Each structure stands twice: as C-alpha cells, then as structure tokens.
Image (cartoon, grey):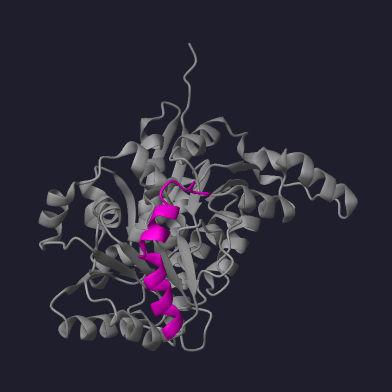
Amino acid sequence: MSLILKRHVAVVTTSRADYSHLYWPLKEIVAHPDLELHLIVMGAHLSASFGETVKQIRADGFSITAALDCLDPEDNDEAMARTIGSAVSQLTPVLGDLRPDILLLVADRYEMLAPASVALALRIPIAHIEGGDISEGAIDDAVRNALTKMSHLHFTPTDDAKHRVLAMGEEAWRVTCSGAPSLDHLSHSRLPDREELQRGLGALLTDHYCVVVYHPVTLNEDTTSELGALFSALTSWERQLIFCYPNADVGSSKVVERIREFCRGRDDARLYVNLDHLTYWSLLSHASLMIGNSSSGIMETASLGLPTVDVGERQCGRTRAANVLDATADIGEITRAMQKATSAEFVLAIKDIRNPYGDGSASLRIVDVLASAPDRQTLLRKRALSLGAEQDSFIQDSMQ
C-alpha cells in the first residue's frame, strides 16, 4: 500500500488584522487530511507596542513553525523599507528549509512583499487571498496588485474583484471567488455576549456607542493629515467611544498620540491596543456606529447591519454595501454622515442588506482548492493570455 503524502502549506501572518482573516483558513488546513500547516509569524505580532499578539496565536492552539522579529521600531517610510528587507533576510532560510508546496498569503500589507519575493526566488507557488479589491488611498493597493501578479492561485473577496484579477491576465482556472474569510467568524464561531464582552473589555458599555478604527493614509505625504477633521467631528458624538489601535504604518504613533489625548479629555472614551477577533466582532455587533477608514468597516460591518462612516481617501474604490456612508476629511461632512448613519430611517433601510464580501464559507472554498490544486510545476508555469478581443471574450466566458 503506497503512502499518501500530505501537501505542505506555509502561511504567513504579520499582524492582528490579517490573522483575523486567516484564522478559519488555518483551522480548516489543520483539519484537512491531505494538508499540513506550517505557520510563520512575523512583524507586528512580535512587537510589545502592538500587543505582542503572537501570544493570542499560541493561545488559539496553533503550532508556530517560525517567529521572525522583523518590524523596524521607527515610525517612518524608511523603517517600512527596512522591515521588508529584514523580513526577506529572515524568511529566506526558513522557506529554503521548508520548501512548502504552496505559500498562502492574504491581502495587502506591505510586509507581504517579503514572503512573496522569497517564494518567487525559491520557485514556491503562491496562493493569495483578497486580490482584485481596491483601496486607492493607500500603498496597499499597489501591494495587492503586485501580489496578484506574483501569485499562482487567487481567492477573491467579491465577484468584481474576480473580474479585475481576470482582467490582469490571470487564467480562469486559477481564480476562485471565495468571499472574505474574516466573515467566517459569524458562521463558524460563537461571539461573546454583551456581558462576556464587557468582562473582556474591563468596562461597561452604554446602550449606544461608536467604534473608531482609523489608520494612516500611507499614500499621502502627510499620512495623518485627516486627523484634525476626524477628531473635531468626533466631539459631536455625545455617547461612548471605543478606539482600536491603528496598523503599524507610517504615522501610527501620531494617531495613537491623538487618540490618547482625546481619551484624556473624556471619561467615556477608551483605547484598546489589541482585541482578539471574537471580541472585536462582538464589539461591532453591539455598536450603534463605526467610523474611520479601516477595511473592516467596508468588508465586515454589512454582515451585522452596522451603520458605518468611511472617512477620507484610504478606502476609495473598494466595493461597499449600502450601510457605508462616505465622507471626505471635512468636519461638517463627517458630522452630517454620522447623523444620517444613526437616524432611524437609515438603520431600518440597511437592516437586511446583503454583504458583497461573501456568505461566511470562504475558508472551506479556499482549503478545497489548496488540496486539489495541480502540482508545483503546473502552478508555476503561468500562461500569458493574448491581447484584445480574444482576451475580452475569455474574461466574459470566465465570469459566466
């Protein structure tokens, strides 16, 4: 009787944000009889400043193959570049020893350029989650597109995203519209109830509170130029405010400083450095409003029917449901959007909306493809599609 070899899948996670998206794909890989997981943890996960979230990964029961401390502590663009360089240097021997059958990456963080570059040099096929989406106000958009062209399997979050990946010349058999795996928490996990949530937060929650998640706008020369308008508008919110920590981007320390200054002036405002994914989802499920510029406000809040105000340029171009109201970085515009979002008419209108980012079954679709994908050489040899009418016809046929 011949021995059936498992397909080895290496997965890289760099922060609490992408770990939330990867949690259920990781669970499904571990559970699949034909797959073996090699989890590589790096970047902000190992930083005390960002909550040392590697501890949460271990608490969730995952075995970590390698933990790489590569996040440069300075808060500037040169530090971002040094982080990529350090990650490439540290990942090379790890992936060189592992030589996995597939490397699985998610989304658009700049650190993901490092594992993709190493895998490309080592001829390791790359599978990429959430390609084809858009965020025109951040360097994430360019990173996401670069990862798409470097990858060999694609799991898009929406039908529109699938169309964009096909338009980039990727062969149809390589592209699956899986949905966003972060939504799988709603169908696979039990969220803490309100009492459990309050115990976890160490604070009582009022009947109507607002969650604020704001990140630097990394494509701007001044990545925090929108802060003044946002915080001026937030003074009009007379109820409780819950702030979540920003990503490890240029300007994050200035965002944190501004939040802490705001919280010092209000007893009903608190900042949390790190919230695990279930606590975060539960926090959103009991909120009256979300405001900021996080992809979470676009991709996830629709599944909860949560009114959301998206501020500024960071998420420009991203597919959104009817629960999201857009506001430029203008005090009056943000304030008016907050008032509209919390009106009884708006809340009723978005009660049963459909989330374009999926149905909570993305991880199963992703893992099924990982297990059944062709061999390494077939994956690596990408075919260039012809230009013009023939390509347009190919894309249309693929979308049917």
Relative side of 297 to 287, left or right: right
Relative side of 13 to 362, left or right: left
Q: Residue at x 55, y 35 (%)?
A: 369
Instruction: Give the answer, above or below, for where 108 lies relative to 161.
Output: below
Does residue 48 show up?
yes
**Between 119 and 134, the one nearer to me in the picture:** 134
**Residue 125: horizontal and vertical position, in percent?**
58, 47
Relative side of 156 to 347, left or right: right
Outermost residue, front direction? 345
Magenta region, mostly helix, strand or loop? helix
**Between 107 and 262, the one nearer to me in the picture:** 262
Would you identify the image quadrant in which residue 54 lies? bottom left
Instruction: Give the answer, above or below, for where 79 lies relative to 93.
Output: below
Q: Residue at x 39, y 35 (%)?
A: 28
Query: From which residue to which does the magenta span run?
Result: 332-356
Q: Is residue 38 magenta?
A: no
Does residue 13 show up?
no
Instruction: Give the answer, above or below, for where 241 lies relative to 21.
Output: below
Would you identify the image quadrant in which residue 91 lies? bottom left
Q: Residue at x 17, y 51 (%)?
A: 194
Q: Is residue 351 magenta?
A: yes
Which quadrant is home to the C terminus? top right
Relative side of 221 to 163, left or right: left
**Residue 360: horizontal and vertical position, in percent?**
43, 40
**Residue 113: horizontal and vertical position, in percent?**
52, 64
**Residue 346: horizontal and vertical position, in percent?**
42, 60
